[in-house]
Image (cartoon, helix red, strand yellow):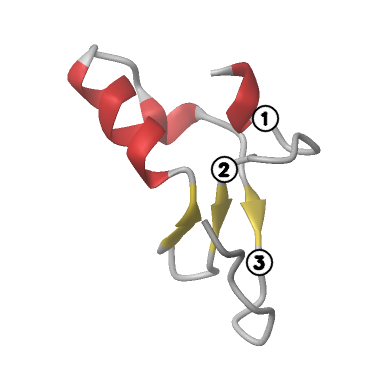
Amino acid sequence: MASLEPGEPGSLKVRPDGTIVDGHHRIEILRERGVNVDALAREVMPKDEPEEDH
């Protein structure tokens, strides 16, 4: 969960509409483990910013 925190290289990044840009695989695993992922901090990326390559 620490890797998803804002400021981390692989932080949870979302679009203003809630679309996950980075971190979706880790979010799915946390959901399966019963973690309330809706409460996690996230970085909102404007639509005009490019997505990171994985």
* Image mark for residue 37: none
Question: Which residue corresponds to mark 2?
Answer: 12
Q: Secondary structure at mark 3?
A: loop
Question: Residue 3, located in which quarter of the rendered image?
Answer: top right
Report, in whole angstroms, how far the alpha carbon at label 3 lies from the one at label 2: 10 Å
Question: Which residue corresponds to mark 3?
Answer: 45
Residue depicted at 53% across the width and 67% down the height: 15
Q: Is residue 30 above or below residue 25?
A: above
Q: Is residue 36 left or right of residue 16?
A: left
Residue 32 in the image: state x and y as whole percent: 19, 20
Q: Are marks 3 and 1 in contact (CB under 8 Å)?
A: no
Report, in whole angstroms, how far the alpha carbon at label 2 lies from the one at label 1: 7 Å
Question: Residue type at mark 1?
Answer: Glu
Q: Is residue 42 left or right of residue 35?
A: right
Question: Which residue corresponds to mark 1?
Answer: 5
Binning the other alpha carbons within 10 Å of mark 1 as few (below 14), some (14 to 19) or many (20 upward) gives some
Question: Residue type at mark 2?
Answer: Leu
Q: Residue furthest bottom?
A: 48
Q: Is residue 52 above or below residue 25?
A: below
